[in-house]
Image (cartoon, rainbow, N blue to C red):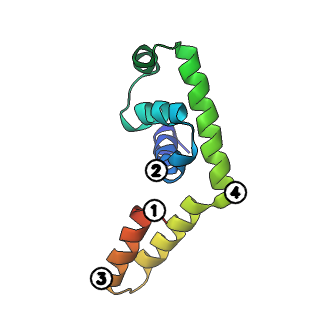
Amino acid sequence: MNDLAQFEYINELLQIYGSLLTKTQLKIMKSYYVFNLSLSEISEELNISRSAVKDCLDKAKAKLLNYEENLKIHTKTMQITDILEKNDVDKEVKEKILEVIDNGI
C-alpha cells in the first residue's frame, strides 16, 4: 500500500473508530489526517513537543488498526459496497444502503 493509500485508509478508519480514541488522540488524528496539519503545526497548537505529537499519532494509528483487525467494520463495509456496485440492485435501495454505510453502521 503506497503512502497516499495508507493515509486514506487511516482516515477512513478514523471516521469509523474515532470515537473510541481519547479526546487528545482524536484531536491530533483529526488535525493530521483531516485538516492535513504538520507535526510542527499540531505541536504549536497544542503546546506539546513534536515528538509527543508523533508518539500520539503512532499509538492512535495502532489502535485504529487493532480495532479494524478485530471488528472488521471497514472490511465489511467495503464488501457490501462492492456487492452493491457489481450487482443489479435497485438504485433507490442502493442509495439508501450506501447512505446507512456512510453514516456509520
Q: Where is residue 61 in the image (x, y as percent from the top left)?
A: 59, 38
Identify which amino acid the numbered label 1 is placed on.
Gly
Q: Element under label 3?
A: helix
For disc 4, the neighbor class at 10 Å (few under 14, some 14 to 19, many from 20) is few
For marks 3 and 4 on the same chain, the one whose residue lies earlier in the sequence: 4
Identify which amino acid the numbered label 3 is placed on.
Glu
Residue at image mark 2: 15
Residue at image mark 3: 92
Gap in Å between the C-alphas at discs 3 and 1? 19 Å
Q: Element under label 2?
A: helix
Looking at the image, residue 69 sits to the left or right of residue 15; the answer is: right
Gap in Å between the C-alphas at discs 1 and 4? 17 Å
Q: Where is residue 33 in the image (x, y as percent from the top left)?
A: 43, 36
Identify which amino acid the numbered label 4 is placed on.
Asn
The structure residue drawn at horizontal position 60% and vertical position 45%, both measured from the top left corner, is: 64
Q: Position of residue 51 (x, y in %)?
A: 58, 16
Gap in Å between the C-alphas at discs 3 and 4? 32 Å
For disc 2, the neighbor class at 10 Å (few under 14, some 14 to 19, many from 20) is some
| Marks 2 and 1 in Cβ contact (< 8 Å) | yes
For disc 1, the neighbor class at 10 Å (few under 14, some 14 to 19, many from 20) is few
Residue at image mark 4: 70
Q: Element under label 1?
A: loop
Q: Residue furthest left?
A: 92
Which label sits on residue 104? 1
Gap in Å between the C-alphas at discs 2 and 1? 8 Å
